[in-house]
Image (cartoon, coloured by chain):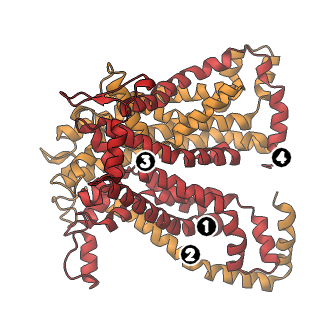
Chain colours: A red, B orange
């Protein structure tokens, strides 16, 4: 059904309504949304550039943006570079840490998410609807509540420590919430794995069942069918799943604050969000956000293009 | 599309019951490891939240030891309950206010945007669609910091607080109705509106009397998603809140709960539970209404075999 739809639709819409309705009507309908996005989504990037290329008011320590690109200065950029690579570079380790946390957490998300999504798409059977509801449920629980829930469990006298002591895995309660990288990565995985599952499920569910039937009919076992048919067919969607978690994770600052809040686990997101409230550091925050944007822009565009090719609804 | 290649193997199964039974045994045994894994995942995923809800009804202030049922943290406690603590109380109001305002403005703008760019058919239209999709996948931190810098450096007449949060949330949420309605438009096609025009409807009349009713389920779905999304939103409202008055529930949980808990932990659990109930009621009611809205259509489609209507 899917392959046939576009041709008929294109045929219909070419002779479509655009020819007979006033030409100004359609752009007019799009204007409010376009203006809103232009002012509050596109314009901010120019302001960020102006702040990043600007100076600081020495008296009040507030950022002084420079609006004319010709006069932009490199002070903030040089300072951020010094913080990243210079002698007492406090940002370098933070960036490395963020990359490490995001990489480990993304891989764990995929390792947990793929089997769950595979089960939902292929083997959930008649109870599929119920399983789907259970898997989607965390979407409607606020992220903060989910972190708060783990904060309850991971406290010094919390249930996790109780359980581990009862199981004789530890003798003393572990201080999970005071700057343990394991806890932060755990929190990231817990927070983002539902998103991976939904993306992977959408992709795995679309794989043509007849291909798997054919592989089985030709004598491949369950394992080899999976390895030679399902897995290669789901490569694209695995990339998409990794991306949909890695992008927001790289800008995450709240997971770290809720589950650690100690400088030894600070992530890039923390530095950026703190810079907004610290006088005199607005410019550096702007530079960091622009850096983050540059790093993320290519994968974002790849994601938008690959999903719009597969059908616009799948961006969700 | 699967019929052709599926049929022979299905036939083989019917013809050879022995193999079919073997197959069923294997299917029951092999995936059970996988099923067990999925169950473990579900418990891990949902149990912590269930425990947080449970302990919001604890009569003591512990979040680990059950001391009896009470509504102390909701209404009873004169200082720390959701009802009596001014910050928690205000947070509920602020969340509802932002959710209603954002939904009322973002959904109509997004729907009109979707209709507009869908029919506009020009390079500009696809450019705006791209901008909209980019806004959809932009990490919220970048989005929020951008608006923070905009409002503190250029549009300084808009102060941080409810207005700033509202403006930013609308921008952040336009994409939902725009994407959902656009997908729906693509599957509806143009012939219904053309028929209306042939029968003498004006351009705007055809939109209002024919297109909008057809789009209604998609619009309704966006209302639910935007409303529930704003309730749970954190990054934007946190970056753009100015004082305690403009901090919604998610931000209060963050500021009071950060750095490993606080004395008000059970009250925060209670607040989070209130938030959860709001989202669930929104989504459940929305889902029920959506099923009702689309039920007749699904049946009609079967009768008239209007495949493209349900496509996408």
What subunit carries mark 3? B
Give the residue number, with chain letter if any, for mark 1.
A118
> Is disc 3 in contact with disc 2, using a CB cutoff of under 8 Å?
no
> Is disc 1 in contact with disc 2, using a CB cutoff of under 8 Å?
yes
| Quadrant position of residue A225 | bottom right
Task: Judge if badges 2 and 4 mark residues of a common chain.
Answer: no
Alpha carbon separation for disc pair 1 and 4: 27 Å
SS of the residue under disc 4: loop
A246 or A58: nearer the eye?
A: A58
Give the residue number, with chain letter if any, for mark 4.
A4
Q: Which of marks 1 and 4 is nearer the N terminus?
A: 4
Give the residue number, with chain letter if any, for mark 2.
B34
What subunit carries mark 2? B
Alpha carbon separation for disc pair 4 and 3: 38 Å
B7 or A297: nearer the eye?
A: A297
Residue A20 position within the rendered picture, expressed as x and y whole percent measured from the top left: 79, 16
Give the residue number, with chain letter if any, for mark 3.
B280
> Is disc 1 in contact with disc 3, using a CB cutoff of under 8 Å?
no
The residue under the point 21% across, 56% down is B261
Alpha carbon separation for disc pair 2 and 4: 36 Å
SS of the residue under disc 3: helix
């Amino acid at each position: 059904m899917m392959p046939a739809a576009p041709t008929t639709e294109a045929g219909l819409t070419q002779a479509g309504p655009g020819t007979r309705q006033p030409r100004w009507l359609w752009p007019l309908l799009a204007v409010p949304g376009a203006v809103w996005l232009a002012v509050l989504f596109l314009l901010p990037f120019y302001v960020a550039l102006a702040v990043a290329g600007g100076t600081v008011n020495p008296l009040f320590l507030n950022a002084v943006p420079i609006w004319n690109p010709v006069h932009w200065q490199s002070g903030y950029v040089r300072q951020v570079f010094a913080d990243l690579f210079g002698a007492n570079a406090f940002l370098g380790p933070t960036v490395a840490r963020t990359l490490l946390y995001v990489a480990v957490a993304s891989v764990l998300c995929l390792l947990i998410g793929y089997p769950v999504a595979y089960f939902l798409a292929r083997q959930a059977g008649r109870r599929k609807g119920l399983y789907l509801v259970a898997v989607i449920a965390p979407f409607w629980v606020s992220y903060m509540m989910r972190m708060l829930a783990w904060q309850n469990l991971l406290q010094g006298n919390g249930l996790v420590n109780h359980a581990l002591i009862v199981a004789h895995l530890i003798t003393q309660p572990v201080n999970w919430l005071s700057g343990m990288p394991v806890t932060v990565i755990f929190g990231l995985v817990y927070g983002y794995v539902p998103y991976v599952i939904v993306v992977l499920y959408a992709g795995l569910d679309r794989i043509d069942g007849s291909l798997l039937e054919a592989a089985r009919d030709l004598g491949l076992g369950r394992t080899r069918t999976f390895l030679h048919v399902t897995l290669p067919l789901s490569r694209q969607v695995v990339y998409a799943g990794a991306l949909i978690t890695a992008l927001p994770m790289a800008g995450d600052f709240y997971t770290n604050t809720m589950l650690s809040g100690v400088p030894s686990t600070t992530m890039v997101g923390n530095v950026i969000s703190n810079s907004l409230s610290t006088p005199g550091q607005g410019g550096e925050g702007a530079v960091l956000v622009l850096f983050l944007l540059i790093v993320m822009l290519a994968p974002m565009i790849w994601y938008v293009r690959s999903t719009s090719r597969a059908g616009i609804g799948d961006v969700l | 599309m699967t019929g052709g290649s599926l049929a022979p193997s299905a036939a083989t199964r019917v013809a050879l019951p022995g193999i079919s039974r073997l197959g069923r045994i294997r299917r029951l045994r092999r995936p059970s490891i996988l099923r067990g894994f999925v169950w473990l995942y579900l418990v891990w995923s949902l149990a912590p939240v269930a425990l947080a809800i449970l302990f919001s009804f604890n009569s003591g202030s512990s979040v680990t030891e059950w001391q009896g049922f009470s509504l102390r943290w909701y209404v009873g406690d004169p200082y720390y309950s959701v009802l009596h603590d001014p910050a928690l109380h205000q947070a509920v109001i602020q969340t509802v206010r932002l959710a209603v305002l954002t939904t009322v403005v973002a959904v109509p703008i997004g729907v009109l945007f979707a209709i507009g760019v869908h029919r506009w058919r020009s390079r500009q239209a696809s450019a705006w669609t791209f901008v909209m999709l980019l806004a959809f996948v932009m990490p919220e931190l970048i989005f929020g910091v951008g608006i923070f810098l905009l409002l503190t450096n250029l549009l300084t007449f808009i102060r941080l607080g409810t207005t700033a949060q509202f403006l930013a949330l609308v921008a952040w949420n336009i994409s939902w109705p725009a994407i959902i309605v656009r997908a729906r438009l693509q599957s509806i096609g143009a012939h219904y509106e053309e028929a209306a025009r042939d029968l003498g409807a004006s351009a705007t009349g055809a939109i209002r009397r024919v297109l909008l009713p057809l789009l209604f389920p998609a619009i309704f779905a966006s209302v639910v998603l935007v409303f529930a999304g704003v309730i749970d939103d954190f990054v934007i409202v946190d970056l753009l809140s100015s004082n305690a008055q403009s901090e919604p529930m998610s931000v209060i949980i963050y500021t009071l709960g950060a750095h490993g808990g606080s004395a008000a932990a059970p009250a925060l659990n209670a607040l989070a539970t209130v938030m959860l109930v709001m989202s669930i009621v929104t989504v459940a009611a929305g889902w029920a209404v959506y099923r009702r809205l689309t039920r007749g259509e699904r049946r009609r489609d079967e009768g008239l075999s209007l495949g493209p209507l349900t496509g996408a």
